Image (cartoon, coloured by chain):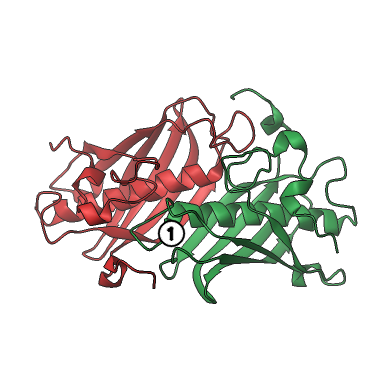
Chain colours: A red, B green
Amino acid sequence: MNKKAFQDCYPEELSHCFGCGKNNTEGHQLKSFWLNIDKENLLDSTTIAHYQPDEKYTAIPGFVYGGMSASLIDCHGTGSASAMAYLAQNREMGSLPALRFVTGALNLSYLAPTPQGVELELIGRFSEVKDRKVIVDITLSANDVVCVKGQVIAVLMPDSMCAKTNN
Amino acid sequence: MNKKAFQDCYPEELSHCFGCGKNNTEGHQLKSFWLNIDKENLLDSTTIAHYQPDEKYTAIPGFVYGGMSASLIDCHGTGSASAMAYLAQNREMGSLPALRFVTGALNLSYLAPTPQGVELELIGRFSEVKDRKVIVDITLSANDVVCVKGQVIAVLMPDSMCAKTNN
């Protein structure tokens, strides 16, 4: 199993995301990995990531703000989608042409306040895998309690987003 | 019309949110206002906020990352919910007991890449107003193009979240 994080396989020019880009030194640099690969039943494969937010990312004192949870779930979702796309094509992650996904929709349910000072765990499961669209269902847990559930509808990055200038 | 931002009316101890708290000097400090108040038809009232993200909040170069849009929509939603709750009770915003809302669910559709270097505009509309639950539909636009649509299901903050320690 490849132990390199999904996000570390992104092309250099697409590695600036504040949530997960290795080239964004001020960002979260989330790292996602396979937890389990099932090549016979792709939908049974799962992904995992861990992250402990800095104290400044407060909602109210003691709790992580919702935008942080949204960001982590978003980036774990698009990363998992990319990894799954490579897996489905039986290609090594990072090989060209790149399969980089963006978020079409992000749906979040905040089930319990997310405590600060705790390493958060994200688990990704797949409910749909198509060439240009992957749906990832994600739980964000703290101390084994699910605090946020999210669904990321990820779509293959359109060429137009690779432009270096504002649209 | 009160020209003070909704978030500047939050109680001091509930003003640390990274997205909108005036006491979080490292955060975004989003400021939301009434665009229009319709006391006869509360649901016709609308809210507005403007924000230009720092360049570090990149998705890929030239575009704002999705976690930032999520954060802005989230905080504009809970702020709008709080303001609406005060309006519905015909109370001045900030008067005690505080009516502070948290996010129960956040649903986002990313319709177009959000360009960087542009002031973003958030408009909030209300689709449901109850004592303990307010639903706010929000558009996030850049250069008059809607880039993200979101719905915030905001619920009155439970007393348990006012504890100063982790749960």
Judged left or right of residue A6, residue A72 is: right
User: Measured from the top left, where is residue B99 in percent x and y?
Assistant: 79, 45
SS for tag 1?
loop
* Chain assignment, label 1: B
Q: Residue furthest top?
A: B165
Return the residue at label 1: B64
User: Measured from the top left, where is residue A88 in percent x and y?
Assistant: 15, 55
The residue sitting at 26% across, 45% down in the picture is A7
Judged left or right of residue B121, residue A159 is: left
Give the camera-side residue of B92 and B107: B92
* Residue A82 drawn above or below residue B11: below
User: Measured from the top left, where is residue B112 in percent x and y?
Assistant: 42, 70
Counting the numbered discs, the total is 1
Give the camera-side residue of A102 and A106: A102
* Residue B32 drawn above or below residue A35: below
| Quarter of the image with the N terminus of chain A in it | top left
User: Measured from the top left, where is residue B6 in percent x and y?
Assistant: 75, 53
Q: Would residue B158 be visible to someone looking at this image?
A: no
Label 1 Cα neighbours within 10 Å, binned few <14 / some 14-19 / many ≥20: many
Q: Amino acid at mark 1?
A: Val
| Quarter of the image with the C terminus of chain A in it | bottom left
* Quarter where residue B165 is shown: top right
Judged left or right of residue A167, residue A160 is: left
The residue sitting at 59% across, 24% down in the picture is B166
